[in-house]
Amino acid sequence: MRISVRARSNLSGKDYKMILCCGEALIDMIPEPTGSGQHGYVPHCGGAIYNTAIALGRLGLSTGMLTGLSNDLFGQQLTRGLRESHVATRLIIKSDRPTTLAFVQLNNGQATYQFFDENSAGRMLSAADFPALPDAISALYFGGISLACEPAAEAYLTFAQRHAATRAIMLDPNIRAGFISDEPRYRARLAKMVALSDVLKVSDEDLDWIDPSTGSTEAKARALMTAGPSAVIVTRGREGALGFLKTGETAEAPAQAVQVVDTVGAGDTFNAGIMANLSENGLLTKDALSELTVDALHQALGFAAKVAAVTVSRAGANPPWAYEMEKEPA
């Protein structure tokens, strides 16, 4: 598949449809050596939903982001990053609250995180803060820690409930257990989001957290499908991805063979690849997704794997641009 370079940054056009990514944007503070020999921290834009928005914008899809951003210097950095990747920012909710910061510590190559998120611009959103949606927006994307951290988590659920009847919804919970302070409440919220979604993407680890039974991957995925999604996609790292449809059919795509530098942002870019392929083929609508064929799902999985492979082949969450994918074989 070739993605055309045709990103637009306004929300007023009627000749195209936009994907709106709804959720967290934060700053990853990454340790790097300084001239003194001590480690300093360098701010990098991040957050699962932010990364997916960046990937969609770079692929040439009409993309916007809905999140809470601070007016501080980190919020300005996040805004610049979106605009540089052709992501519309008009629906972002600005405030003077601080930006969420994630300080990364590396021990023997393993990363651990310490988050500073109290009273942040992203976390303190309420349903009343959310704007009306322009008609140009035809699909919504949710997930990440924004569905775990209240009060914003409840606001995103309310927003999804408000628009699920008229917009296609893709969900990737991207579960981070450390953010879940009230597991029963989170599970109840997640179940409502799954029921609203048209496409549900989970990693195999997410799937086992949601359903800790000894059932097979397919059995667990199809059990989730009964709640509402037209398609459930399960990513399995080096083993590739599986896609399940209500028809009983299954699609599969292997992981691409590349030299892995790191896996930061791989899943987020994969999600962008799914939505980009479906959108380019006119399938990212509620009606089209309800009748999605196994061939179309297979094609979307394959393209998503190729896009994610570019991201893992270089450092950080650095998804490819459309021109880079045009160099890839179809």
Image (cartoon, grey):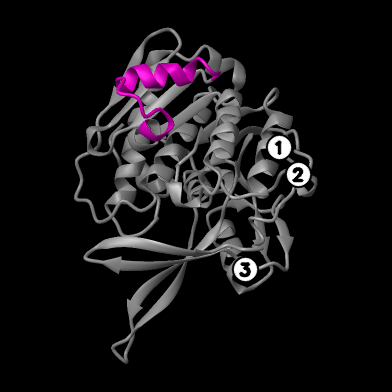
Is residue 227 part of the magenta span, yes or no? yes
Q: Quadrant of residue 97?
A: bottom right
User: In percent of the image, x 53 and y 29: which residue is there?
Assistant: 279
Amino acid type, mark 2 = Ala
- Numbered disc in front, either 2 or 3: 2
**Mark 3, residue position:** 76
Name the element at disc 2: helix
Is label 2 in contact with label 1 (beta carbons under 8 Å)? Answer: yes
- Numbered disc in front, either 3 or 1: 1
Amino acid type, mark 3 = Gln
Left or right for 140, reference 304: right
Left or right for 96, reference 47: right
In front here: 232 or 112?
A: 112
Earlier residue among tags 2 and 3: 3
Instruction: Give me the C-alpha separation between circle 2 and circle 3.
Output: 23 Å
Quadrant into which the C terminus falls: top left
Residue 310 is situated, as x and y percent measured from the top left of the image, at 31, 47
Estimate how packed mark 3 is, as few (under 14), some (14 to 19) or many (20 or more) residues with alpha carbons within 10 Å.
few
**Mark 1, residue position:** 159
User: In percent of the image, x 35 and y 53: which residue is there?
Assistant: 264
**Mark 2, residue position:** 127
Question: In the orientation shown, which residue stands out farthest toward the bottom?
Answer: 36
Earlier residue among tags 2 and 1: 2
Earlier residue among tags 3 and 1: 3
Name the element at disc 3: helix
Residue 88 is situated, as x and y percent measured from the top left of the image, at 64, 50
Instruction: Give me the C-alpha separation between circle 2 and circle 1.
Output: 7 Å
Residue 19, above or below 230: below
- Residue 296 visible to the viewer: no
Q: Which residues are magenta?
A: 208-228
User: In percent of the image, x 75 and y 46: which residue is there?
Assistant: 130
